[in-house]
Amino acid sequence: MAYILNSAGATVGYFFIGRRARMMNVRQGLPRFVLLRSVLLFVLVVAVQFVVSPTLLTGGILLLLGFVYAAYYILMLSLSMELIPSGRSGVFDVLVGLGAAAGSFLGPFLSQNLNYLPTFLIAGAVFLAAFIAIKLFS
């Protein structure tokens, strides 16, 4: 169910952001979506741990996480096309694919060995560190 909700949010996000990507300022939008993804992951942890009946709330958060990921991905691709010299975009695509493949194995491994709570905390911390790195180095 979590995968379905996340994928539904991503699908809506691709359609929503895809039309508006040309009008958005990519350099300002990308850090916002990275920070929003980090905050949503921390809110998800709080909702699961402290809310009495978190089902509806976690479903909404998972939809938003998918939406934010889609927006982040489109903006990241747009920005990479501005920064990466012609002929090198294939390397970028390979690295994105390797990251997705490694993440699809690492996430379930951490969930099985650490439980879900630390896995979401780690993911939230990584996105927060990415936001800080973007702010410091851009």
Image: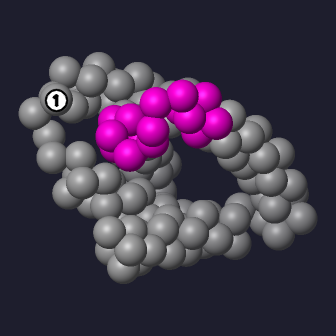
- Secondary structure at badge 1 equals loop
Using the image, determine if residue 130 lies above or below residue 107.
Answer: below
Q: Hey, what amino acid is under mark 1?
A: Arg
Using the image, determine if residue 118 lies above or below residue 57.
Answer: below
Residue 18 in percent (x, y) is at 27, 24
Q: How many marks?
A: 1
Residue at the disc numbered 1: 22
Residue 41 in percent (x, y) is at 48, 62
- For the stretch drawn in magenta, what is the main secondary structure? helix
Residue 12 is left or right of residue 114, and the answer is: left
* Of 138 and 66, the residue lying toward us: 138
Residue lying furthest front: 86
Residue 112 in percent (x, y) is at 87, 57
Q: Quadrant of residue 71?
A: top left
* Of 11 and 29, the residue lying toward us: 29
Boundaries of the magenta span: 75-93
Q: Quadrant of residue 39?
A: bottom left
Q: Quadrant of residue 115?
A: bottom right
Using the image, determine if residue 63 lies above or below residue 22.
Answer: below
